Amino acid sequence: MDEEQMSLSRMEQLLQDNLELAEENNRLLRQLRRAVRASFWARIILWAIVIALPLLLLRPVLNAVVPATGDGAGPFGLFPSLEDAEKFREILDSGSLAQ
């Protein structure tokens, strides 16, 4: 009977140790999940800053350069303005390009 009591006592101790380990594991996993979530959002914010900041800093330079390249229509003057599109349409309608 003494052996049986020792065996039960040992089992209870092992179960208690297992419970403590499971609780510690759960706590560590929650901390890890929280850290991964924070890291994800920090990366999103960092990339938004990396992409947006140069655009904001270059805006005055681009505004100064675009009028020098044409009438300033579209980004970097690559797209025609409405006036240019109307002129082109008139040319097409008149048939001057067909020659």
Image (cartoon, helix red, strand yellow):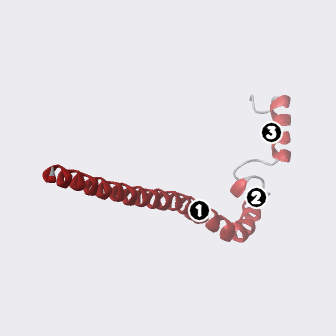
Q: For this view, does 71 lie left or right of residue 47? A: right
Residue at point 41% right, 55% down?
26
CA–CA distance in space, label 3 to label 2: 16 Å
Q: Earlier in the sequence, mark 2 or mark 1?
A: 1
Quadrant of the image occupied by residue 75: bottom right
Q: Earlier in the sequence, mark 3 or mark 2?
A: 2
- Indicate which disc residue 10 carries: none
The image quadrant where one finds the C terminus is: top right
* Relative image position of residue 5 (x, y in whole percent): 20, 52
* Relative image position of residue 80 (x, y in whole percent): 76, 47
- Indicate which disc residue 88 carries: 3
Q: Residue furthest front?
A: 1
Q: Which residue is mark 2?
A: 70
Between 11 and 99, the one nearer to me in the picture:
11
Give the residue type at disc 3: Phe
Dot 3 alpha-carbon crowd within 10 angstroms: few under 14, some 14 to 19, many 20 or more: some
Dot 2 alpha-carbon crowd within 10 angstroms: few under 14, some 14 to 19, many 20 or more: few
Give the residue type at disc 1: Ile
Give the residue type at disc 2: Gly
Quadrant of the image occupied by residue 27: bottom left
Q: Which residue is mark 1?
A: 45
Residue at point 68% right, 67% down?
56
